[in-house]
Image (spheres, rainbow, N blue to C red):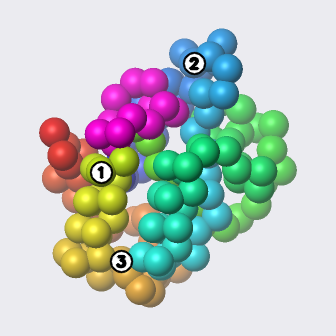
Amino acid sequence: MIYSHNLAYTFFTSTVKNLKIADCKLLGYQWDGSYKNALEISHEIQKSNQCSNCLEMGINAVNHQTQIRRYLVITSASTPYCQLTNDDESLITKAIDKLKSDTALFPQLPSNPLKNIFSSEWLNFGK
């Protein structure tokens, strides 16, 4: 799903709760900010949800070397946020398409793309 940084604490807490679940990671995919790249990432996640060059977000983020770049983290609409369902896949595609048509997010992003670009309506998108 697409959320603002306002829910970061929720996702961080879920990574603590899910430490014992094998392969339950929120992965940050390096993102160029484009609609096309967001779709490519979405398709990659829907195929395997495995990424060798992604950064793990949440409690285990401290185990990775910090890289200052733009990342896209796609989550499930419900806990555990790391496990996407078929329903999530269609919601993700709709959310990315909605971003393309309703915002100035694509194709160019300001230097701080996540600041004030997501409204509260995204928090309940598709529910």
At label 3, counting other C-alpha atoms closer than 10 Å, the crowd grade (few under 14, some 14-19, many 20 or more) is some
Going by the numbered disc 2, the residue's amino acid type is: Asn
Residue 97 higher or lower than 107, as above or below: above
At label 2, counting other C-alpha atoms closer than 10 Å, the crowd grade (few under 14, some 14-19, many 20 or more) is some
Q: Sequence-wise, which precedes: disc 2 or disc 3?
A: 2
Mark 1 against mark 3, which lies toward the viewer? 1
Going by the numbered disc 1, the residue's amino acid type is: Ser
Residue 4 higher or lower than 81, as above or below: below
- Would residue 93 appear left or right of 5 to someone viewing this image? left
Real-space Cα separation, disc 1 to disc 2, in angstroms = 24 Å
Residue 9 in percent (x, y) is at 45, 34
**Mark carried by residue 55:** none
Residue 104 in percent (x, y) is at 30, 82
Q: Does the magenta stretch include residue 82?
A: yes
Q: Which secondary structure, mark 3?
A: loop
Q: Mark 3 points at which residue?
A: 105
Q: Can residue 112 be seen in this view?
A: no
Point 42% across, 50% down: residue: 5
Point 48% across, 58% down: residue: 42
Q: Mark 1 points at which residue?
A: 90
Point 41% across, 86% down: residue: 107
- Would residue 47 appear left or right of 30 to someone viewing this image? left
- Would residue 19 appear left or right of 95 to someone viewing this image? right
